[in-house]
Image (cartoon, coloured by chain):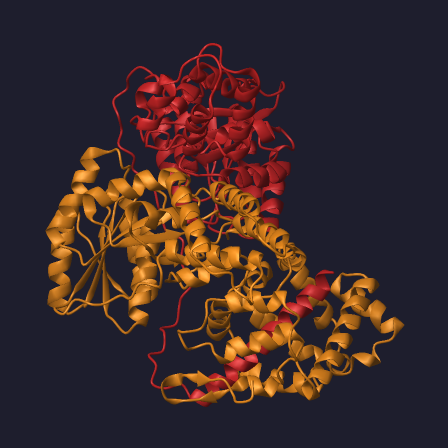
Amino acid sequence: MFDALTDRFERLSASLRSRGRLSEADLDEALRDVRSALIEADVELSVVRAFLDAVRDRLRGQALSQSLTPGQQVIKAVHAQLIDILGGSALKITYAPRPPTVVLLAGLQGAGKTTTAAKLARWFAQQGRHPMLVAADLQRPAAVEQLRVLGASIGVDVFSEPTTPVEVARRGLETAQRIGRDVVIVDTAGRLAVDEALMDEVAQVSAAIAPHYTFLVIDAVTGQDAVHTARAFHDRLELTGLIVTKLDYDARGGAVLSARGVVGRPVVFAATGEKIEDFDLFHPDRMASRILGMGDALTLIEQAERAMDPEVVAESAGRLMSGTFTLDDFLAQLNQVRKMGSLGGLMRLMPGMTKEMRTAASSIDERQLGQVEAIIRSMTPRERREPALIDGSRRARIARGSGTTVPAVNQLLKQFTEMRKMMRSMGSGGLPPQMGRMAQLAARARPQDLPPGFEALADATRPAPSAPAPRGARGKKKKGGRVTPPKGR
Amino acid sequence: MSTVIIILVVVALLAIGATVATVVVRRRRPALVAPPPVAPLPEVLVPEEAPRPELRDEPAMRARLGASRGVFDRLRGLGAGDVGEDDLATVEEVLLRSDVGLATTEAVLDSLRRDGAPEGVATAVRGVLRASLDRPRDVVEVADEGRVAVWLFVGVNGVGKTTTIGKLARREGERGHRVVIAAGDTFRAAAADQLALWADRTGADLVRAHEGADPGSVVHDAVGRAAARGADLVFADTAGRRANSSNLLDELAKVRRVADRGPGQVLETLLVLDATTGQNALSQAREFLAAAQVSGIVLTKLDGTARGGVVVAIERELGIPVKFVGVGEGVDDLLPFDPDEFVDALLRA
């Protein structure tokens, strides 16, 4: 996601980092690079211009900071402006005082509206609401069926009837009131913005049900046309905001960046994968950090929390620190990580990773993970507990058993042993700086006032201070699940 | 290197996980509403019932393309001779707004700076763009003696692959070919149903298998059936999802291999692209080119406001010609690509 943009910004920050003082010419050059990066990422032209002007203003109005190099200052300004353009903070969804809260979805064909409707319903259910889906996409007969199946899989009722979209929407709303559903999500047919008849129809649907939220569903790979689409729909429907889909592809995300600049409406939700749980509120601050290659520890932590089994993790983490970590633990851990998504994707979220590491990680595919698993599974339980036991002939056997080569087995064993040694020393000493910071962030995961990641970057550019002890990372819990960092940091 | 990274990631995540777990355990899960268990997202039937238009003459591409925009008109107003910075800025804006991309735009601007515009800026820009679209774009329909021609269709989700196959089946049927459609998207059961509708409508034969079947075997069967029944053209659909890039590569490469065996002969591999797609289309094209040796592009959804200018970049950088454009939902709304009309529409000259 946003790879191209991230790459450009990374190169930019690398070249700026080495400057002591920033001249007007340097600034011009830097901003030209920012401009190319944005255009390459499909950001709408007028938005690009406004963005650059705003960054320039920010820099001009600012007294030279003592603690930041000029390069960092540019990046900070770009980061702040990115957050701004992406919509400030995440939108807070409120509910109608007299339920149901009505949500209308519209968009072009192939943008992913129907799937989004189901994902949104699940999201509302997770918030403790009782959603109902209304399938008003009668254009595509199977759309209703598709929504029914999706609805059944998440335990949400789906209403539809073979009349007209307006009638379906109206009756759906009535039904929801009658059976006591407090959120109604109406899925409409995909249409082109230039198709007057269909645009009229969706406007009528909107008039009939008076939605509290109207979302335009848009594909993240959309180019400059995103703006026309958003504007056309906004003219007819008064959009609340956008839902961006397929943000997992190596999308440039220009549509995301442009929407707020052009129609003044933010991206509210983002679908980041094909699975129904790959959907959440859109967090502008996190996205801005991600675009600038600063990583996104908060999302990473949330993902870990969702996918990992705390019992398993706690147990093997204990063994990791005490140096009794076995290959079995490693395998269990590997499988937990696999549940979270691709290594490349995870790597991208990790702050403090270099570009080389990220590239290397994204070139690793499932097969290589499978290979590691196969090697470990070809060992006897005793070998997994005591890797030192594995001699030449055992290695040959393991290689044969796993369909790999002896060097591959050697490499895994060597790396594993080294890692174990490193972790054991950390158990008594300190974490390496990178992970120390991760742990800090993890401990502060909940509070919403976490700085948006800029500190992480600033830290990374300075020599790291002495790393905190791992046990310090746990922090202290207060009421309401908030965690305060431990003293002495 | 890869083992190092795997271990590193696992350990780093373990550290995170451990911290999270500690926090969670301490928190003892306050009465949070537990999220309902999530069933895997099923892929569902999506046959598309496109409205059936009455038959009519092939409309000109231009007549079907979207509404004009202010800045494009300004381009036409620019005069001949030397090109000033303002003119260049206008040209740049027009091109970037059509999704032509930065590299191509720079190339056009360079050429304007170098050569000026003796016959007007619009003509000059048109000339440069037209030159980058100068390549053969015929489709090959006839296989070697005794073999069956196979066209593979590749592309990401939601671009209109199935609809394109339907429309092309109609076109080739009218041109006197007997078409067999292979429902190679076995990932989505619905894809086959959707193709069945089209097969029904166009009189083509359909070969399908159960959900999750090996796409290669479907294509193999289709080639076999075509050979047995005297059909001469097989259209092979493929799954649109981009799982992990290496899986895609493997699957496509395999389908291609299988299709090219025995009586089958792969003559065209068509990448279906959505005109609303921006610069990302370039990476899609690159990926599919590597996986399946794409021989041409079908640009769909050109009837909206999107101009699909990114295909210029694709032709320039990767040399893949656009062969067809989709300008509507009807059976006949698929036209051979006409570079002149396309460039005109791009510039509204």
- The letter of the red chain is B
**Apparent side of residue A73 relative to residue B304 in the rendered image (left or right):** right
The answer to whether residue B176 of the structure is visible from this angle is no
- Tell which of B323 and A290 is nearer to you: A290
The answer to whether residue A113 of the structure is visible from this angle is yes
Residue A214 in picture, x, y percent from top left: 23, 53
Q: Residue furthest top?
A: B119
Question: In the rendered image, which quarter contains the N terminus of chain B?
Answer: bottom right
Q: In the rendered view, tell whether residue B8 sits above or below residue A315.
A: above
**Apparent side of residue A29 relative to residue A354 in the rendered image (left or right):** left
Residue at 68 percent across and 69 percent down: it is: B7
Query: Which color was chain A given?
Result: orange
Residue A144 in picture, x, y percent from top left: 26, 50
Q: Residue furthest right?
A: A392
Residue A171 in picture, x, y percent from top left: 12, 55
Residue A133 in picture, x, y percent from top left: 24, 59
Residue at 12 percent across and 68 percent down: it is: A98
Residue at 34 percent across and 41 percent down: it is: A227
**Apparent side of residue A146 relative to residue A436 in the rendered image (left or right):** left
Q: Quadrant of residue A413?
A: bottom right
Q: In the rendered view, tell whether residue A400 sits above or below residue B24.
A: above
